[in-house]
Amino acid sequence: AKVNADQIWFNGELMPWENATVHVMSHGLHYGTSVFEGIRAYKTHRGTCIFRLEEHVERLFDSAKIYRLNIPFTREEVMQACKDSVAQNNLDSAYLRPLAFLGDVGMGLRPPVDANAELMIAAFSWEAYLGADALENGVDVGVSSWNRLAPNTMPTGAKAGGNYLSSQLISNEAARHGYTEGIALDVNNYVSEGAGQNLFLVRNGILYTPPSTCSILPGLTRDTIITLAKQMGMEVREELIAREALYLADEFFMCGTATEIVPVSTVDGIKVGTGSRGEVTRKIQDAFFGIFTGETEDKWGWLAPVK
Ligand code: PMP
């Protein structure tokens, strides 16, 4: 199905949706050779702004570096292309999907050393990933029978297309069991992350989140929450989390660019805290969404106006 993106930026120019196509012999299609980003633009008190654009573009180049993919554009060009994609489609808020992949560079696992990646950026409307009322009412999640990728197999620090095969196993299984999303344990069976979200627990007023060594994608929403929580005087601990801690938390929420910040009501059918959104979760949400209304001062330069 076609998402609502009229003009797609592809290899240096904006073009109509219909023209942004690739060849069936693309390396990325056969071997998963792609890295991508998910970014949001919000309608803010300063006009339409892309949230943490610089850090997202940096992560795209980091992911490409791990897989030795050469993106033939500068970071500045990519940032400008993201802004143009939002502005030219007349969107006042948007989800942006930059994707770098190897096209028709020939078969065989090892691409020619001088092969350049192709780069596309689509900007389109995308409402809350886990449903509109999830932000307030929370979601039901279950621990997956699938583990997250083990260290030194496929690096979860790269946001690579292939990693999302693992995410699909986790997410599909969760849906089959009637859950909104699945939570994965890492290869040592400590809590890792959701299929497409990081997670936080709150117990006795302290925030806990798995460290980057637990096979997580180091999320920018996670980083934003850590920064905002500390600034509000809350204690944040990045430490190993055992599965049962999910059941005993006072509050539990998941976070990501598409998901934003969503409270968890039940895990494996066990009620978390009161089963509805907790105070700490609400404070974090308010601080987060306050960045876009101006109620939270943007001390960090996180908002990039699209024009
Ligand atoms: N983990 C995974 C596997 C993800 O796909 C995402 C979404 N990009 C996240 C965590 C959250 O990252 P971010 O806050 O940067 O969107």
Image (spheres, rainbow, N blue to C red):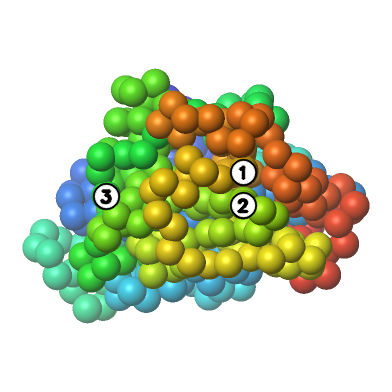
Question: Do residues under tags 1 and 2 come within 8 Å of each other at their CB atoms?
Answer: yes
Q: Is disc 3 surrounded by few (<14), some (14 to 19) or many (20+) residues within 10 Å? A: many
Q: Is disc 2 surrounded by few (<14), some (14 to 19) or many (20+) residues within 10 Å? A: some
**Marker disc for residue 98:** none
CA distance separating discs 1 and 3? 25 Å
Question: Residue 175 location in percent, x, y?
Answer: 37, 25
**Marker disc for residue 203:** 2
- Amino acid beneath label 3: Asn
**Along the viewing direction, whichever of 116 and 138 lies nearer the viewer:** 138
Let me know if residue 123 appears in the view.
no
Asked if residue 108 lies left or right of residue 168, the reply is left
Which numbered disc, 3 or 2, marks the residue closer to the eye?
Answer: 2
Question: Residue 190 location in percent, x, y?
Answer: 35, 57
Question: Residue 184 location in percent, x, y?
Answer: 35, 47
- Amino acid beneath label 2: Arg
Task: Say above or below: 219 vs 258.
Answer: below
Give the residue at x 17% y 50%: 30
> Mark 1 or mark 3: which comes first in sequence?
3
| Mark 2 within 8 Å of ligand 1, using the beta carbon | no
| Mark 3 within 8 Å of ligand 1, using the beta carbon | no
Which numbered disc, 1 or 3, marks the residue closer to the eye?
Answer: 1
Question: Residue 141 location in percent, x, y?
Answer: 45, 33
> Mark 3 or mark 2: which comes first in sequence?
3
Residue 55, quarter of the rendered image: bottom right
Residue 171, quarter of the rendered image: top left
Asked if residue 220 lies left or right of residue 183, the reply is right
Asked if residue 258 lies left or right of residue 180, the reply is right
User: Circle 3 sits on which residue?
Assistant: 147
**Marker disc for residue 250:** 1
